[in-house]
């Protein structure tokens, strides 16, 4: 109720002004804090010399970002450009063999990066899941898949298998975990799809073509086997009109985002400040709230850039990969919260939707969400922080359903029915604002640290109550209303015009 209801333009304008002013005020506080903290001893390791013509140090606390776009930038560009070049040549000369070219190039890249013994290790896992898929028992496939995934996450098996890597470099651990984990997810998808469609008789070669597609191999996203196979077997793929222009735009946006993030890190030390709790505790409440929010936005931006680069290459190969995750700013529902759309689709298809059905019943939804977050915990690597993150987000997902069920019964249903649609939208946006901060706090635990999350919660809910608490809710409420307005506009654009889609009478 209320999702398609428009609010007065003046009211939306006030929301925009309040939100813009609050963000600018918080950004000013973070900028001043970054300038003051640049001389602190705790900042020396993370704040390193940046671009010379900017004349400021750069926040380098995220070693993955620094490695991707400094030390390994040329290697990544060389590997992806080589893939694009050979894929184009193969598509022009022998398009029916392009899937084989993808697999061969990916196998050579893995051998060159991680060594031949690592490749043999992954081939062993692939062969094991392929053999199990021939038995046609989905429970055996998912069981072996989870066991294979656990072998890369739990000691002492992970240490033993990491010994198969014969190369030594800074991102070795990251590439080992990512390549191994995604391999298990892809092989499990292959096995489950083989069980679902036994008449199609997929071969081991199909599995290898699927798993060793280089753009997806190390960092995803995960395409389920049925989607990938259906697209890659097309002998003469046809590109939709305007597709090349959209690919160029996506590539340009990815490059512009990388540059913008680098410039941003010269002025805002959003990753370094949370590591110095004494300094963070001295921040104004508005700056602290902005710091917590910006940490989640940055994690989304990092995922969006990674997916943008990889998806650009995949779209050049005539594939339709999973899109970047939904921006954290537009999230006020736990059911839509994810930072990796490919893994989210994998979990929904093989675990969450399979157990939970239409997600309208309380008990099946509880079982489905617990099973989903159990697999997610295994994927992330079992530890105290991951366990806490899983419990909090699982509770948030189920609590939404409980509140929804409660709102469908008297007297709450009657109370909402007595409200106008505009007022109903305002009430729901207020609950969405509280939910938005629950999403931020629950995910800040794993993206930053438990100590920093406790600091933010204490300042915003206890020491800052009621002024800071109500001010943050007001600003968030304005943001949720603007997001709802955007959703309403998109929903109206997608609706067919009156009479469209109906057959004309004879």
Image (tube, grey):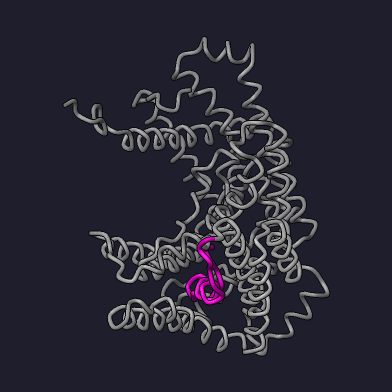
Residue at point 61%, 19% (across, down): 408
Residue 175: x and y in percent read 61, 76
Report the quarter where the C terminus lies: top left
Residue at point 65%, 27% (across, down): 403
Residue 480: x and y in percent read 49, 35
Residue 309: x and y in percent read 43, 68
Q: Is residue 411 above or below residue 84?
A: above
Question: Quadrant location of residue 433?
Answer: top right
Residue at point 66%, 51% (across, down): 444
How many numbered marks appear? 0
Residue 127: x and y in percent read 65, 76
Q: Residue furthest right?
A: 156
Is residue 66 visible from the viewing direction of this image?
Answer: no
Q: Is residue 490 left or right of residue 297?
A: left
Q: Is residue 29 left or right of residue 318?
A: right
Query: Which one is nearer the viewer's eye here, 218 or 249?
Result: 218
Query: Which one is nearer the viewer's eye here, 191 or 263?
Result: 191
Q: Is residue 33 above or below residue 422?
A: below
Query: Which one is nearer the viewer's eye here, 95 or 71?
Result: 95
Examine the structure image and report whether residue 282 is included in the region drawn in magenta: no
Q: Residue furthest left?
A: 506
Q: Is residue 79 above or below residue 23?
A: below
Q: Which residues are magenta?
A: 199-222
Is residue 313 visible from the viewing direction of this image?
Answer: yes
Question: Quadrant location of residue 36?
Answer: bottom right
């Amino acid at each position: 109720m209320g999702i398609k209801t428009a609010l007065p333009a003046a009211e939306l304008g006030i929301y925009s002004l309040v939100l813009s002013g609050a963000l600018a005020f918080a950004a000013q506080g973070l900028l001043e804090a970054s300038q003051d903290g640049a001389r602190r001893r705790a900042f020396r390791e993370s704040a390193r010399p940046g671009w010379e013509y900017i004349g400021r140090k750069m926040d380098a606390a995220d070693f993955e970002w620094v490695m991707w776009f400094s030390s390994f930038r040329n290697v990544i560009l060389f590997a992806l450009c080589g893939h694009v070049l050979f894929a184009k040549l193969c598509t022009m000369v022998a398009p029916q063999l392009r899937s084989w070219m993808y697999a061969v190039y990916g196998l050579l890249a893995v051998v060159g990066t991680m060594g031949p013994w690592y490749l043999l290790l992954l081939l062993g896992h692939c062969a094991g899941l392929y053999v199990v898929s021939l038995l046609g028992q989905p429970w055996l496939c998912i069981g072996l898949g989870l066991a294979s995934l656990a072998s890369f996450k739990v000691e002492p098996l992970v240490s033993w298998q990491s010994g198969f890597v014969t190369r030594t470099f800074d991102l070795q651990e990251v590439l080992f975990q990512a390549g191994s984990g995604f391999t298990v997810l892809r092989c499990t998808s292959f096995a489950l799809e083989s069980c679902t469609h036994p008449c199609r008789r997929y071969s081991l070669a199909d599995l290898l073509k699927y798993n060793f597609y280089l753009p997806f191999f190390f960092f995803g996203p995960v395409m389920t086997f049925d989607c990938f196979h259906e697209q890659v077997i097309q002998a003469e793929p046809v590109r939709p009109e305007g597709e090349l222009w959209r690919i160029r735009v996506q590539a340009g946006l990815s490059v512009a985002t990388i540059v913008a993030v680098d410039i941003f890190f010269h002025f805002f030390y959003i990753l370094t400040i949370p590591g110095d709790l004494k300094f963070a505790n001295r921040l104004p409440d508005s700056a602290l709230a902005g710091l917590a929010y910006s940490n989640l936005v940055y994690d989304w931006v990092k995922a969006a850039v990674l997916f943008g680069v990889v998806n650009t290459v995949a779209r050049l190969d005539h594939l339709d990969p999973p899109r970047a995750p939904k921006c954290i700013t537009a999230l006020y529902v736990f059911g839509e919260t994810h930072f990796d759309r490919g893994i989210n689709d994998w979990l929904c298809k093989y675990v969450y939707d399979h157990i939970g059905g239409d997600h309208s019943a309380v008990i099946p939804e509880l079982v489905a969400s617990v099973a989903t977050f159990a697999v997610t915990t295994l994927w992330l690597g079992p530890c105290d922080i991951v366990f806490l993150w899983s419990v909090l987000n699982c509770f948030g997902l189920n609590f939404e359903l409980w509140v929804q069920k409660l709102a469908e019964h008297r007297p709450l249903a009657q109370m909402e029915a007595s409200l106008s649609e505009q007022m109903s939208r305002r009430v729901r946006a207020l609950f969405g604002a509280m939910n938005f901060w629950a999403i931020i706090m629950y995910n800040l635990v794993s993206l930053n640290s438990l100590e920093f999350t406790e600091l933010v919660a204490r300042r915003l809910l206890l020491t800052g109550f009621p002024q800071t608490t109500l001010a943050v809710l007001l600003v968030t409420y304005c943001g949720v209303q603007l997001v709802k307005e955007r959703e309403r506009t998109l929903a109206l654009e997608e609706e067919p015009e009156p009479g469209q889609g109906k057959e004309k009478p004879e």
